[in-house]
Structures are given as structure tokens and as C-alpha cells.
Image (spheres, grey):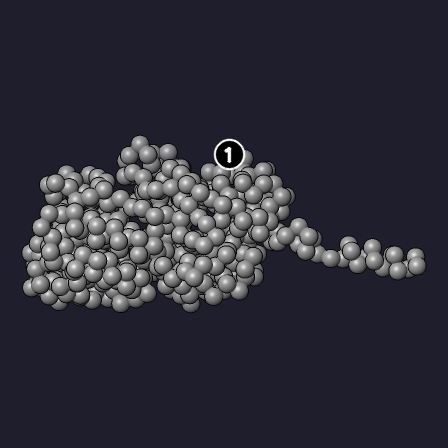
Amino acid sequence: MLIRLVLAIVAFYSIPLSAYAGDTAGVTGTTIKIGLFGPMTGQSNLGAKPVYGAAAIYKDVNAKGGIYGRKIEIVIEDDGCDGNKGIAAVKKLIAQDKVFLLHGAYCSAVALAVRPEIASHPNLPYIVLTAANPHISSPVLPNLFQPTTTAPIIAQQMVAFALSKPGVKKIAVVKHSDEWAAGYFDALGPELAKHGLTPVTVQALERGMTDATVPVLALKQAAPDVVVALLYPAEMAIYLRDAYKYGLKATTLGTTAVSIDDTDKRIGIPAAVKDVYFANNLAGTLTSQELSKYAKIFKKYYPGEALDTKAFDSMGGAIAIVEVLRRAGPDLTRERFIEEFDKLRNFNTRVQSAPLTFAPEDHVGLKGVKWIALVDKKPVLFDHYPAQSN
């Protein structure tokens, strides 16, 4: 009898703590380990800005004492905006670095590539950095959250903004042939159809191309009132440069993947960014009062980095992560973190264009954008097309 009792006690204390307390991987008494990944190198190295933006928020939290006495330990991996590199980065962060949660993917191709890996670790929280493809978070995975706008939301608002310009009847598209652009384009068609419209022409401008003469001339021949440009930063600058060169007269609308400041710098021709508007996930402009606090935080920790709107894109997600870590309490587990993220409602990050709201059946948090353009060389936000174009 005594032997059986001793064996029972030994067996009880041999059961892993996680079986009772939940999954606490990546958490110690003094640290919370977060795996942060994005394109630090490669064609989309502007994506390093969101990585630095998120990291700046975490470092600022540490400087203020951390969360329940724990400091955030950041492990950064480069995905190069490449799906295979993204998978390798995620596997390393999970297996080798043993992070508590993942925060990453500027490029939709990476987020889509790592989704199966995330699904195979249902207790591991994954918060998307800035990637916008709707299939990243749909169908819903319980542990995957997208604290940004998705392509269908932006496509819907692109059409609304385009049609707020008086007399618009012809809309054209220039785009990449990848998963990222497909996410927008697939949503754009049905949205245009609601207004009895179809694109007058659809032109391709592939990643890495340095000349947009052919698509620009085809667009000019179609004479659209508005061109929807589903392009990454480098190609957007090339398109606008050549559109100006060949006298294409049309309003251009771009996605949140492109920064007006960066585009202006890349082209170096102020007239080339006239009547150009980009969807904007932020509450203000770089120099606005709304973002001044966060601009100071970014420059404090990354003084050598030029301030750019992309530096703020991931801050809302990082701020939400910090808030949920606090709500989860000092007895932190992955399960509790996921549960609390599902309860986040109408949360004002003070960085993003609208509050974040999540629910078990909807893991897309941001539902509204503003539009940003240069007016007299200064960025200005718009809700609809201005009465007089810039």
C-alpha cells in the first residue's frame, strides 16, 4: 500500500507543469521571448522598417520596466520576402529559439507560406506584421491574428475613393503577378462590378523590372480616369516615373505596402507624385501630433534609420501584443494569451487609422484606412478624393 502511494506521488510530480498550467514556452520569471521576422534584406528591404518599428515598441516597454517584471527578449530573423526563407525562419524561432509568440511577415507570400507551420502548432500565437492577403487569416486559425487591413477591405475602399472623384467612369489596373497582388485584384473585380464597372485594361509590371514603358503606354491608350497600382515600392516608383515621362494623365491609387515619402525620394521628381494617393493604415502623418510620440520612440532606438510611414505600420500590432500580455496577467501561458487576443474589442492603438477588434470568428483587426498624398510637398490625409486635386 505504501509503495503504491509513493509511486502515485512520484508519478504526479513527474507530469510536466504545462499539463496543468498551460504552455509557458518562451516565458521565464524575467523574460518573454518574441520571434520577430521580416525582409531585412532583398528587393523589399523597406520591410525592415516595420520590423524596427515593432522592435522599438518592445524596447520602449522594457525601458519602462517590462510587463509584470518580465522584459521582452526579441529574436529577429530575415525572411527576405521569400516563402522558403520565411518557413526556415519560423522553424528556427520555434525549435531553436523556443519563442513564446511569433510576430512577422511584411510580405503576403511569406505569411501564406508559413501558415501551415503555424497551423501545426495550435498553441503558438502568431501575429502578422503587416501582410494583407485575406487568405492569411481565412479560414480562421485560432492562434493566428492579422492586426492590419486585408486586401478586400482596401480594395473596397479603393473603389469608394476612386468613385468619390467626380466624373470617374474608367478604371485600369497595373499589377504584379504574385499572391500579394492577387489578393487585391481578386477582391477588386467584384467591388467594381457592384458599380457596373470592369477594368478597361489590366497591365503587368513584374517584380524586379526596371522599365514600365510597355504597361504605361498601354494604359495611356486606354485613357483611364484612375489607375489602381498593385505594386511594391520599387516598381511603384518605376511606374510613376514612366507615367510622368510618357504623359499618362490619371489619378493613381496604391496600397498600404507603399510609402508616399519613400516613393517621392525614389523618383526625385515632385510632379511625378502629383494626383497620387496611397492607402494608409495610420492615424496621422509622419510629422503629425498623433504620431509624434511614436516617432520619438522609433528614433530613440533606431537613430540611424530614416523615419518613414512604414516604420509605424507594425506598431499597432506590437502595441496590441503588449496590451494582451498585460491582460493575460502574471501567470502567462500561450493559451491565456490567445484567449485574451480573441477578446480584444475596439482597442485604440493610437497609431492606426481605426481601432482593432477581434472575435473568435474574425481575426482581421483593422477595418478602415485613410488616404495619403503629397500636397505642396507635405503629406496630407484624406477620407475621400479632394474637391481640387493636389
User: Which residue in the protein does label 1 denote?
Assistant: 64
Considering the image in quadrants, where does the C terminus appear? top left
In screen coordinates, is 308 left or right of 241?
right
Considering the image in quadrants, where does the N terminus appear? bottom right
| 251 vs 287: above or below | below
Residues 357 and 37: in front is 357
Identify which residue is drawn at 49% across, 41% down. 323
Residues 262 and 153: in front is 153
User: Can residue 273 be seen at all in this image of the molecule?
Assistant: no
User: Can residue 18 be seen at all in this image of the molecule?
Assistant: yes
- Which quadrant holds residue 308? top left
Q: How many marks?
A: 1
Identify which residue is drawn at 23% across, 52% down. 158
- Which quadrant holds residue 176? bottom left
Residues 96 and 113: in front is 113
Relative image position of residue 295 (x, y in whole percent): 35, 37
**Residue type for callout 1:** Lys
Residues 196 and 96: in front is 196
